[in-house]
Protein backbone atom coordinates (compact mmCIF):
# COMPACT_ATOMS: atom_id res chain seq x y z
CA UNK A 1 0.00 0.00 0.00
CA UNK A 2 1.43 3.36 -1.00
CA UNK A 3 0.08 6.84 -0.72
CA UNK A 4 -1.45 8.09 -3.96
CA UNK A 5 -3.19 4.83 -4.65
CA UNK A 6 -6.94 5.30 -4.34
CA UNK A 7 -10.07 3.14 -4.05
CA UNK A 8 -13.22 3.48 -6.13
CA UNK A 9 -16.57 4.29 -4.53
CA UNK A 10 -17.79 0.91 -5.78
CA UNK A 11 -14.94 -0.94 -4.09
CA UNK A 12 -15.58 1.04 -0.90
CA UNK A 13 -19.24 0.04 -0.93
CA UNK A 14 -18.36 -3.62 -1.49
CA UNK A 15 -16.08 -3.44 1.51
CA UNK A 16 -18.67 -1.63 3.65
CA UNK A 17 -21.23 -4.31 2.83
CA UNK A 18 -18.74 -7.06 3.71
CA UNK A 19 -18.28 -5.68 7.25
CA UNK A 20 -21.02 -7.03 9.53
CA UNK A 21 -21.20 -3.77 11.51
CA UNK A 22 -21.05 -1.37 8.54
CA UNK A 23 -23.73 -3.42 6.76
CA UNK A 24 -25.95 -3.18 9.85
CA UNK A 25 -25.21 0.57 10.02
CA UNK A 26 -26.26 0.86 6.37
CA UNK A 27 -23.67 3.52 5.47
CA UNK A 28 -22.81 3.78 1.76
CA UNK A 29 -20.60 6.07 -0.33
CA UNK A 30 -22.51 8.23 -2.82
CA UNK A 31 -19.72 10.36 -4.35
CA UNK A 32 -16.17 11.68 -4.06
CA UNK A 33 -15.85 15.27 -5.23
CA UNK A 34 -13.31 18.00 -4.54
CA UNK A 35 -11.46 15.96 -1.90
CA UNK A 36 -14.72 15.25 -0.02
CA UNK A 37 -16.18 11.76 0.34
CA UNK A 38 -20.00 11.80 0.64
CA UNK A 39 -22.05 9.08 2.34
CA UNK A 40 -25.68 8.38 3.12
CA UNK A 41 -27.37 6.02 5.52
CA UNK A 42 -30.93 4.93 6.14
CA UNK A 43 -32.59 4.93 9.52
CA UNK A 44 -33.11 1.78 11.59
CA UNK A 45 -35.30 1.68 14.68
CA UNK A 46 -32.40 0.37 16.75
CA UNK A 47 -30.48 3.64 16.23
CA UNK A 48 -32.78 5.51 18.60
CA UNK A 49 -31.18 6.53 21.90
CA UNK A 50 -34.37 6.87 23.93
CA UNK A 51 -37.90 5.45 23.76
CA UNK A 52 -39.30 9.02 23.72
CA UNK A 53 -38.19 10.06 20.25
CA UNK A 54 -36.30 8.96 17.16
CA UNK A 55 -33.05 10.83 17.74
CA UNK A 56 -29.91 8.83 17.02
CA UNK A 57 -27.83 7.59 19.96
CA UNK A 58 -24.43 9.26 20.21
CA UNK A 59 -22.77 5.91 19.59
CA UNK A 60 -24.38 5.73 16.14
CA UNK A 61 -23.04 9.17 15.24
CA UNK A 62 -19.61 8.17 16.54
CA UNK A 63 -19.70 5.02 14.39
CA UNK A 64 -20.68 7.05 11.30
CA UNK A 65 -17.88 9.59 11.86
CA UNK A 66 -15.31 6.86 12.53
CA UNK A 67 -16.29 4.98 9.38
CA UNK A 68 -16.37 8.12 7.23
CA UNK A 69 -12.92 9.25 8.41
CA UNK A 70 -11.41 5.79 7.90
CA UNK A 71 -12.74 5.63 4.33
CA UNK A 72 -11.57 9.19 3.58
CA UNK A 73 -8.09 7.73 4.11
CA UNK A 74 -8.88 5.11 1.44
CA UNK A 75 -8.93 7.93 -1.14
CA UNK A 76 -5.21 8.42 -0.45
CA UNK A 77 -3.92 5.04 0.70
CA UNK A 78 -6.04 2.63 -1.36
CA UNK A 79 -7.81 1.10 1.64
CA UNK A 80 -9.51 2.33 4.82
CA UNK A 81 -7.08 2.77 7.69
CA UNK A 82 -7.31 1.64 11.31
CA UNK A 83 -8.42 4.23 13.89
CA UNK A 84 -5.93 5.23 16.58
CA UNK A 85 -8.10 7.87 18.21
CA UNK A 86 -11.39 9.64 17.59
CA UNK A 87 -12.81 12.95 18.87
CA UNK A 88 -16.46 13.86 18.37
CA UNK A 89 -18.51 17.01 18.94
CA UNK A 90 -22.27 16.60 19.23
CA UNK A 91 -23.93 19.78 17.97
CA UNK A 92 -27.67 19.03 17.67
CA UNK A 93 -30.06 16.06 18.12
CA UNK A 94 -29.93 13.87 15.00
CA UNK A 95 -33.48 13.08 13.87
CA UNK A 96 -34.44 9.60 12.74
CA UNK A 97 -34.28 10.13 9.00
CA UNK A 98 -31.73 9.84 6.22
CA UNK A 99 -28.42 11.28 7.40
CA UNK A 100 -25.61 12.54 5.19
CA UNK A 101 -21.95 12.21 6.16
CA UNK A 102 -19.00 14.06 4.59
CA UNK A 103 -15.33 13.32 5.22
CA UNK A 104 -11.93 14.46 4.04
CA UNK A 105 -8.27 13.96 4.83
CA UNK A 106 -6.57 16.80 6.74
CA UNK A 107 -3.04 15.39 6.69
CA UNK A 108 -1.64 12.22 5.15
CA UNK A 109 1.80 11.16 6.31
CA UNK A 110 3.95 8.08 5.99
CA UNK A 111 2.90 6.55 9.28
CA UNK A 112 -0.18 8.48 10.39
CA UNK A 113 -3.12 10.28 8.77
CA UNK A 114 -5.67 12.74 10.19
CA UNK A 115 -9.20 12.96 8.75
CA UNK A 116 -12.34 14.89 9.67
CA UNK A 117 -16.04 14.24 9.09
CA UNK A 118 -19.46 15.80 9.63
CA UNK A 119 -22.94 14.31 10.00
CA UNK A 120 -25.63 16.46 8.39
CA UNK A 121 -29.39 16.30 8.24
CA UNK A 122 -31.11 15.91 4.86
CA UNK A 123 -31.37 19.69 4.59
CA UNK A 124 -27.72 20.25 5.44
CA UNK A 125 -27.84 21.19 9.12
CA UNK A 126 -24.68 20.23 11.04
CA UNK A 127 -25.53 17.57 13.66
CA UNK A 128 -22.15 16.20 14.76
CA UNK A 129 -18.56 16.49 13.59
CA UNK A 130 -15.15 15.27 14.54
CA UNK A 131 -11.72 13.99 13.71
CA UNK A 132 -9.77 10.82 13.85
CA UNK A 133 -6.14 9.76 13.70
CA UNK A 134 -5.33 6.68 11.62
CA UNK A 135 -2.33 4.41 11.34
CA UNK A 136 -1.01 3.61 7.86
CA UNK B 1 -32.23 17.29 39.21
CA UNK B 2 -29.54 18.21 41.68
CA UNK B 3 -26.06 16.94 42.18
CA UNK B 4 -25.80 14.38 44.97
CA UNK B 5 -28.91 12.56 43.88
CA UNK B 6 -27.99 9.13 42.53
CA UNK B 7 -29.62 6.33 40.53
CA UNK B 8 -29.66 2.65 41.45
CA UNK B 9 -28.04 0.02 39.23
CA UNK B 10 -31.49 -1.51 38.77
CA UNK B 11 -32.97 1.80 37.58
CA UNK B 12 -29.99 2.25 35.22
CA UNK B 13 -30.56 -1.19 33.71
CA UNK B 14 -34.28 -0.49 33.26
CA UNK B 15 -33.37 2.68 31.42
CA UNK B 16 -30.69 0.95 29.31
CA UNK B 17 -33.23 -1.72 28.27
CA UNK B 18 -35.78 0.99 27.38
CA UNK B 19 -33.37 2.59 24.88
CA UNK B 20 -33.61 0.84 21.51
CA UNK B 21 -29.88 1.29 20.83
CA UNK B 22 -28.62 0.37 24.32
CA UNK B 23 -30.85 -2.71 24.31
CA UNK B 24 -29.39 -3.74 20.93
CA UNK B 25 -25.88 -3.07 22.31
CA UNK B 26 -26.70 -5.29 25.28
CA UNK B 27 -24.76 -3.23 27.82
CA UNK B 28 -25.82 -3.68 31.47
CA UNK B 29 -24.57 -2.37 34.82
CA UNK B 30 -23.16 -5.04 37.12
CA UNK B 31 -21.95 -2.99 40.11
CA UNK B 32 -20.97 0.42 41.46
CA UNK B 33 -18.01 0.27 43.81
CA UNK B 34 -15.48 2.85 44.99
CA UNK B 35 -16.72 5.52 42.56
CA UNK B 36 -16.45 3.11 39.60
CA UNK B 37 -19.46 1.92 37.62
CA UNK B 38 -18.94 -1.55 36.10
CA UNK B 39 -20.73 -2.85 33.02
CA UNK B 40 -20.75 -5.98 30.90
CA UNK B 41 -22.01 -6.71 27.43
CA UNK B 42 -22.49 -9.82 25.35
CA UNK B 43 -21.20 -10.25 21.83
CA UNK B 44 -23.45 -9.97 18.76
CA UNK B 45 -22.30 -10.99 15.29
CA UNK B 46 -23.15 -7.52 13.97
CA UNK B 47 -20.43 -5.95 16.17
CA UNK B 48 -17.68 -7.34 13.96
CA UNK B 49 -15.82 -4.73 11.92
CA UNK B 50 -14.51 -7.04 9.21
CA UNK B 51 -15.53 -10.38 7.73
CA UNK B 52 -12.05 -11.76 8.53
CA UNK B 53 -12.32 -11.94 12.29
CA UNK B 54 -14.56 -11.18 15.26
CA UNK B 55 -12.94 -7.97 16.45
CA UNK B 56 -15.38 -5.23 17.43
CA UNK B 57 -15.80 -2.24 15.09
CA UNK B 58 -14.48 1.00 16.56
CA UNK B 59 -18.01 2.39 16.51
CA UNK B 60 -19.13 -0.29 18.96
CA UNK B 61 -16.32 0.60 21.36
CA UNK B 62 -17.19 4.30 21.00
CA UNK B 63 -20.83 3.53 21.78
CA UNK B 64 -19.84 1.52 24.88
CA UNK B 65 -17.57 4.29 26.17
CA UNK B 66 -20.17 7.00 25.48
CA UNK B 67 -22.86 5.02 27.30
CA UNK B 68 -20.61 4.16 30.24
CA UNK B 69 -19.51 7.79 30.71
CA UNK B 70 -23.08 9.09 30.48
CA UNK B 71 -24.27 6.63 33.12
CA UNK B 72 -21.29 7.40 35.38
CA UNK B 73 -22.83 10.88 35.55
CA UNK B 74 -26.09 9.28 36.76
CA UNK B 75 -24.29 8.30 39.97
CA UNK B 76 -23.96 12.02 40.76
CA UNK B 77 -26.91 13.67 39.00
CA UNK B 78 -29.63 11.03 39.30
CA UNK B 79 -29.89 10.42 35.54
CA UNK B 80 -27.53 9.88 32.62
CA UNK B 81 -26.42 13.15 31.03
CA UNK B 82 -26.28 14.19 27.38
CA UNK B 83 -22.90 13.98 25.64
CA UNK B 84 -21.32 17.22 24.42
CA UNK B 85 -18.09 15.69 23.18
CA UNK B 86 -16.30 12.36 23.28
CA UNK B 87 -12.64 11.38 22.83
CA UNK B 88 -11.56 7.79 22.36
CA UNK B 89 -8.22 6.00 22.25
CA UNK B 90 -8.12 2.58 20.63
CA UNK B 91 -5.38 0.53 22.29
CA UNK B 92 -5.81 -3.07 21.06
CA UNK B 93 -8.20 -5.11 18.88
CA UNK B 94 -11.30 -6.02 20.92
CA UNK B 95 -12.05 -9.73 20.49
CA UNK B 96 -15.60 -10.95 19.98
CA UNK B 97 -16.32 -12.09 23.50
CA UNK B 98 -17.76 -10.64 26.72
CA UNK B 99 -16.34 -7.16 27.23
CA UNK B 100 -16.19 -5.30 30.53
CA UNK B 101 -16.53 -1.53 30.77
CA UNK B 102 -15.61 0.68 33.72
CA UNK B 103 -16.48 4.36 34.11
CA UNK B 104 -16.13 7.12 36.67
CA UNK B 105 -16.73 10.85 37.00
CA UNK B 106 -13.61 13.05 36.85
CA UNK B 107 -15.31 16.38 37.58
CA UNK B 108 -18.94 17.22 38.29
CA UNK B 109 -19.91 20.87 38.03
CA UNK B 110 -23.13 22.85 37.96
CA UNK B 111 -23.37 22.99 34.20
CA UNK B 112 -20.88 20.44 32.87
CA UNK B 113 -19.42 17.11 33.93
CA UNK B 114 -16.40 15.14 32.70
CA UNK B 115 -16.29 11.34 32.89
CA UNK B 116 -13.86 8.65 31.72
CA UNK B 117 -14.29 5.01 30.80
CA UNK B 118 -12.29 1.95 29.72
CA UNK B 119 -13.21 -1.17 27.76
CA UNK B 120 -11.45 -4.28 29.03
CA UNK B 121 -11.27 -7.88 27.89
CA UNK B 122 -12.56 -10.62 30.17
CA UNK B 123 -9.06 -11.03 31.62
CA UNK B 124 -8.62 -7.33 32.26
CA UNK B 125 -6.54 -6.19 29.28
CA UNK B 126 -7.15 -2.55 28.29
CA UNK B 127 -8.70 -2.41 24.80
CA UNK B 128 -9.98 1.17 24.47
CA UNK B 129 -10.45 4.13 26.78
CA UNK B 130 -11.62 7.68 26.65
CA UNK B 131 -13.43 10.65 28.06
CA UNK B 132 -16.58 12.57 27.49
CA UNK B 133 -17.98 15.95 28.44
CA UNK B 134 -21.64 16.06 29.47
CA UNK B 135 -24.18 18.82 29.95
CA UNK B 136 -26.18 18.89 33.16
CA UNK C 1 -23.64 39.40 26.09
CA UNK C 2 -25.79 38.08 23.28
CA UNK C 3 -24.97 36.15 20.18
CA UNK C 4 -24.72 38.34 17.08
CA UNK C 5 -22.76 41.02 18.88
CA UNK C 6 -19.22 41.12 17.52
CA UNK C 7 -15.83 42.62 18.48
CA UNK C 8 -13.57 44.64 16.22
CA UNK C 9 -10.06 43.44 15.34
CA UNK C 10 -8.75 46.55 17.08
CA UNK C 11 -10.62 45.74 20.29
CA UNK C 12 -9.36 42.14 20.10
CA UNK C 13 -5.77 43.34 19.79
CA UNK C 14 -6.17 45.70 22.74
CA UNK C 15 -7.44 42.79 24.78
CA UNK C 16 -4.67 40.46 23.59
CA UNK C 17 -2.05 43.06 24.58
CA UNK C 18 -3.70 43.48 28.01
CA UNK C 19 -3.28 39.76 28.79
CA UNK C 20 0.20 39.12 30.22
CA UNK C 21 0.44 35.71 28.50
CA UNK C 22 -1.00 36.75 25.12
CA UNK C 23 1.32 39.77 25.08
CA UNK C 24 4.30 37.50 25.76
CA UNK C 25 3.06 35.14 23.04
CA UNK C 26 2.88 38.10 20.66
CA UNK C 27 -0.25 36.92 18.83
CA UNK C 28 -2.22 39.65 17.02
CA UNK C 29 -5.30 39.70 14.78
CA UNK C 30 -4.61 40.81 11.21
CA UNK C 31 -8.04 40.41 9.56
CA UNK C 32 -11.50 38.85 9.70
CA UNK C 33 -12.74 37.72 6.30
CA UNK C 34 -15.36 35.21 5.20
CA UNK C 35 -15.97 33.92 8.73
CA UNK C 36 -12.23 33.34 9.27
CA UNK C 37 -10.18 35.23 11.84
CA UNK C 38 -6.52 35.59 10.81
CA UNK C 39 -3.64 36.07 13.26
CA UNK C 40 0.12 36.43 13.12
CA UNK C 41 2.80 36.07 15.71
CA UNK C 42 6.53 36.75 15.84
CA UNK C 43 9.11 34.29 17.01
CA UNK C 44 10.75 34.48 20.45
CA UNK C 45 13.77 32.38 21.43
CA UNK C 46 11.86 30.97 24.40
CA UNK C 47 9.38 29.24 22.07
CA UNK C 48 11.95 26.64 21.06
CA UNK C 49 11.27 23.14 22.36
CA UNK C 50 14.82 21.82 22.14
CA UNK C 51 18.30 23.33 22.15
CA UNK C 52 19.04 21.60 18.81
CA UNK C 53 16.79 23.63 16.55
CA UNK C 54 14.25 26.44 16.46
CA UNK C 55 11.06 24.40 16.22
CA UNK C 56 8.21 25.59 18.43
CA UNK C 57 7.37 23.57 21.54
CA UNK C 58 3.97 21.87 21.33
CA UNK C 59 2.78 23.99 24.24
CA UNK C 60 3.28 27.15 22.16
CA UNK C 61 1.18 25.72 19.33
CA UNK C 62 -1.50 24.67 21.82
CA UNK C 63 -1.54 28.19 23.27
CA UNK C 64 -1.88 29.72 19.79
CA UNK C 65 -4.75 27.39 18.85
CA UNK C 66 -6.53 27.95 22.17
CA UNK C 67 -6.24 31.73 21.82
CA UNK C 68 -7.33 31.72 18.18
CA UNK C 69 -10.41 29.56 18.90
CA UNK C 70 -11.41 31.68 21.91
CA UNK C 71 -11.20 34.88 19.85
CA UNK C 72 -13.11 33.30 16.94
CA UNK C 73 -15.99 33.12 19.44
CA UNK C 74 -15.63 36.89 19.98
CA UNK C 75 -16.81 37.40 16.39
CA UNK C 76 -20.18 35.97 17.47
CA UNK C 77 -20.48 36.71 21.18
CA UNK C 78 -18.72 40.08 21.47
CA UNK C 79 -15.90 38.79 23.66
CA UNK C 80 -13.55 35.81 23.75
CA UNK C 81 -15.04 32.83 25.57
CA UNK C 82 -13.54 30.56 28.22
CA UNK C 83 -12.15 27.21 27.08
CA UNK C 84 -13.84 24.06 28.37
CA UNK C 85 -11.74 21.60 26.39
CA UNK C 86 -9.14 21.66 23.64
CA UNK C 87 -7.95 19.00 21.16
CA UNK C 88 -4.82 19.47 19.07
CA UNK C 89 -3.24 17.58 16.18
CA UNK C 90 0.45 18.19 15.52
CA UNK C 91 1.11 17.71 11.82
CA UNK C 92 4.65 18.98 11.17
CA UNK C 93 7.52 20.66 13.08
CA UNK C 94 6.80 24.41 13.34
CA UNK C 95 9.92 26.35 12.33
CA UNK C 96 11.05 29.37 14.31
CA UNK C 97 9.70 32.07 12.05
CA UNK C 98 6.51 34.08 11.64
CA UNK C 99 3.52 31.77 12.06
CA UNK C 100 0.01 32.41 10.79
CA UNK C 101 -3.08 31.21 12.64
CA UNK C 102 -6.61 30.96 11.25
CA UNK C 103 -9.75 30.26 13.27
CA UNK C 104 -13.48 30.03 12.78
CA UNK C 105 -16.62 29.08 14.69
CA UNK C 106 -18.11 25.65 13.86
CA UNK C 107 -21.21 25.90 16.04
CA UNK C 108 -22.46 28.71 18.27
CA UNK C 109 -25.18 27.81 20.75
CA UNK C 110 -26.78 29.47 23.74
CA UNK C 111 -24.55 27.83 26.31
CA UNK C 112 -21.65 26.33 24.36
CA UNK C 113 -19.66 27.10 21.21
CA UNK C 114 -17.25 24.99 19.17
CA UNK C 115 -14.40 26.59 17.19
CA UNK C 116 -11.49 25.29 15.13
CA UNK C 117 -8.08 26.72 14.26
CA UNK C 118 -4.96 25.97 12.23
CA UNK C 119 -1.34 27.07 12.57
CA UNK C 120 0.35 27.61 9.20
CA UNK C 121 3.88 28.44 8.12
CA UNK C 122 4.53 31.68 6.24
CA UNK C 123 4.08 29.82 2.95
CA UNK C 124 0.80 28.21 4.01
CA UNK C 125 1.88 24.73 5.07
CA UNK C 126 -0.35 23.20 7.76
CA UNK C 127 1.66 22.70 10.97
CA UNK C 128 -0.95 22.03 13.65
CA UNK C 129 -4.72 22.23 13.91
CA UNK C 130 -7.44 21.57 16.41
CA UNK C 131 -10.70 22.41 18.06
CA UNK C 132 -11.99 23.75 21.30
CA UNK C 133 -15.26 23.89 23.18
CA UNK C 134 -16.13 27.16 24.89
CA UNK C 135 -18.67 28.19 27.50
CA UNK C 136 -20.83 31.24 26.79
CA UNK D 1 15.76 3.21 21.95
CA UNK D 2 13.83 0.26 23.31
CA UNK D 3 10.90 0.02 25.63
CA UNK D 4 11.92 -0.83 29.20
CA UNK D 5 14.80 1.59 29.16
CA UNK D 6 14.08 4.44 31.55
CA UNK D 7 15.46 7.92 32.32
CA UNK D 8 16.38 9.22 35.77
CA UNK D 9 14.60 12.24 37.27
CA UNK D 10 17.95 14.02 37.22
CA UNK D 11 18.43 13.37 33.49
CA UNK D 12 14.86 14.55 32.85
CA UNK D 13 15.51 17.78 34.72
CA UNK D 14 18.75 18.37 32.80
CA UNK D 15 16.82 17.93 29.59
CA UNK D 16 13.95 20.17 30.74
CA UNK D 17 16.46 22.91 31.61
CA UNK D 18 18.14 22.55 28.20
CA UNK D 19 14.85 23.27 26.36
CA UNK D 20 14.35 27.04 26.04
CA UNK D 21 10.57 26.72 26.45
CA UNK D 22 10.59 24.21 29.33
CA UNK D 23 13.19 26.32 31.15
CA UNK D 24 10.98 29.39 30.73
CA UNK D 25 7.97 27.33 31.94
CA UNK D 26 10.01 26.30 34.98
CA UNK D 27 8.63 22.75 35.17
CA UNK D 28 10.80 20.23 37.05
CA UNK D 29 10.42 16.58 38.02
CA UNK D 30 10.22 15.98 41.77
CA UNK D 31 9.66 12.21 41.97
CA UNK D 32 8.60 9.03 40.17
CA UNK D 33 6.54 6.73 42.37
CA UNK D 34 4.10 3.91 41.64
CA UNK D 35 4.08 4.58 37.89
CA UNK D 36 3.34 8.30 38.42
CA UNK D 37 5.77 11.07 37.50
CA UNK D 38 5.37 14.16 39.72
CA UNK D 39 6.35 17.68 38.67
CA UNK D 40 6.24 21.16 40.16
CA UNK D 41 6.50 24.58 38.61
CA UNK D 42 6.83 28.10 39.95
CA UNK D 43 4.62 30.98 38.92
CA UNK D 44 5.74 33.68 36.48
CA UNK D 45 3.78 36.89 35.91
CA UNK D 46 3.62 36.14 32.18
CA UNK D 47 1.47 33.04 32.83
CA UNK D 48 -1.55 35.16 33.68
CA UNK D 49 -4.34 35.03 31.12
CA UNK D 50 -6.01 38.31 32.01
CA UNK D 51 -4.95 41.56 33.67
CA UNK D 52 -7.76 41.12 36.25
CA UNK D 53 -6.34 38.22 38.20
CA UNK D 54 -3.46 35.76 38.41
CA UNK D 55 -5.15 32.71 36.88
CA UNK D 56 -3.02 30.77 34.41
CA UNK D 57 -3.81 31.06 30.70
CA UNK D 58 -5.13 27.83 29.18
CA UNK D 59 -2.06 27.68 26.96
CA UNK D 60 0.17 27.38 30.03
CA UNK D 61 -1.89 24.47 31.36
CA UNK D 62 -1.79 22.83 27.92
CA UNK D 63 1.99 23.21 27.84
CA UNK D 64 2.34 21.68 31.32
CA UNK D 65 0.13 18.71 30.40
CA UNK D 66 1.92 18.18 27.09
CA UNK D 67 5.33 18.24 28.79
CA UNK D 68 4.23 15.98 31.64
CA UNK D 69 2.76 13.38 29.26
CA UNK D 70 5.84 13.43 27.01
CA UNK D 71 8.14 12.85 29.98
CA UNK D 72 5.89 10.10 31.37
CA UNK D 73 6.85 8.27 28.18
CA UNK D 74 10.52 8.72 29.10
CA UNK D 75 9.95 6.36 32.05
CA UNK D 76 9.30 3.59 29.51
CA UNK D 77 11.24 4.57 26.40
CA UNK D 78 14.32 6.26 27.89
CA UNK D 79 13.55 9.69 26.43
CA UNK D 80 10.53 11.97 26.10
CA UNK D 81 8.47 11.25 22.99
CA UNK D 82 7.06 13.60 20.35
CA UNK D 83 3.40 14.58 20.67
CA UNK D 84 1.02 13.49 17.90
CA UNK D 85 -2.15 14.82 19.50
CA UNK D 86 -3.25 16.31 22.79
CA UNK D 87 -6.66 16.63 24.46
CA UNK D 88 -7.23 18.85 27.47
CA UNK D 89 -10.11 19.39 29.89
CA UNK D 90 -10.12 22.61 31.88
CA UNK D 91 -11.87 21.97 35.20
CA UNK D 92 -11.25 25.06 37.38
CA UNK D 93 -9.33 28.36 37.20
CA UNK D 94 -5.66 27.73 38.02
CA UNK D 95 -4.48 30.28 40.60
CA UNK D 96 -1.11 31.96 40.26
CA UNK D 97 0.84 29.86 42.72
CA UNK D 98 2.90 26.70 42.72
CA UNK D 99 1.17 24.07 40.59
CA UNK D 100 1.72 20.33 40.78
CA UNK D 101 1.50 18.09 37.74
CA UNK D 102 1.18 14.29 37.71
CA UNK D 103 1.50 12.05 34.66
CA UNK D 104 1.49 8.38 33.80
CA UNK D 105 1.55 6.10 30.76
CA UNK D 106 -1.79 4.49 29.84
CA UNK D 107 -0.52 2.31 26.99
CA UNK D 108 2.97 1.84 25.58
CA UNK D 109 3.21 0.18 22.18
CA UNK D 110 5.90 -0.36 19.59
CA UNK D 111 4.96 2.66 17.50
CA UNK D 112 2.63 4.76 19.65
CA UNK D 113 2.13 5.53 23.34
CA UNK D 114 -0.77 7.14 25.23
CA UNK D 115 -0.19 9.09 28.44
CA UNK D 116 -2.39 11.15 30.75
CA UNK D 117 -1.66 14.02 33.13
CA UNK D 118 -3.36 16.28 35.68
CA UNK D 119 -2.58 19.77 36.94
CA UNK D 120 -3.34 20.20 40.64
CA UNK D 121 -3.26 23.12 43.04
CA UNK D 122 -0.91 23.03 46.03
CA UNK D 123 -3.69 21.50 48.14
CA UNK D 124 -4.53 18.83 45.57
CA UNK D 125 -7.56 20.28 43.81
CA UNK D 126 -7.89 19.12 40.17
CA UNK D 127 -7.51 22.13 37.83
CA UNK D 128 -7.00 20.59 34.39
CA UNK D 129 -6.34 17.15 32.99
CA UNK D 130 -5.87 15.45 29.69
CA UNK D 131 -4.22 12.94 27.45
CA UNK D 132 -1.76 12.83 24.64
CA UNK D 133 -0.70 10.40 21.96
CA UNK D 134 3.03 10.09 21.29
CA UNK D 135 5.11 8.59 18.52
CA UNK D 136 7.96 6.25 19.47
Image (cartoon, coloured by chain):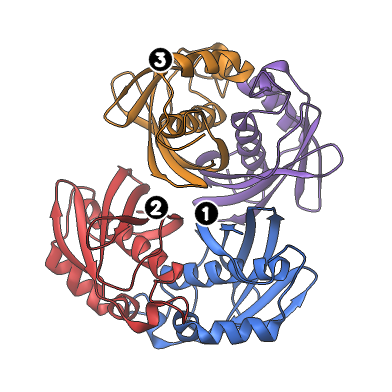
Chain colours: A red, B blue, C orange, D purple
* Residue D97 seen in the figure: yes
Which picture quadrant has residue D11? top right
Left or right relative to D113: residue C29: left
Residue D42: percent from left, percent from top: 78, 24
Residue D126: percent from left, percent from top: 75, 46
Which picture quadrant has residue A56? bottom left
Left or right relative to C110: residue C125: left
Q: Residues within 10 Å of mark 1 (few under 14, many from 20)?
A: few
User: How many numbered discs, if any?
Assistant: 3
In depth, the one of B68 and D4 nearer the eye is B68
- Residue under numbered circle 3: C98
Does dot 2 land on a helix, a strand or a loop?
Answer: strand
Figure quadrant of the C terminus of chain B = bottom right
Which picture quadrant has residue C33? top left
Examine the rendered structure and indicate whether residue C51 appears above or below residue B16: above
Residue C23 disc label: none
- Residue under numbered circle 2: A130
- Residue under numbered circle 1: D110
Amino acid sequence: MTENSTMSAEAMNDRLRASPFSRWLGIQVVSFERETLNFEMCWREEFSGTPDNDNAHGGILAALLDTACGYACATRYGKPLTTVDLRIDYHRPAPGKVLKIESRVIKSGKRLATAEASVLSENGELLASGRGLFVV
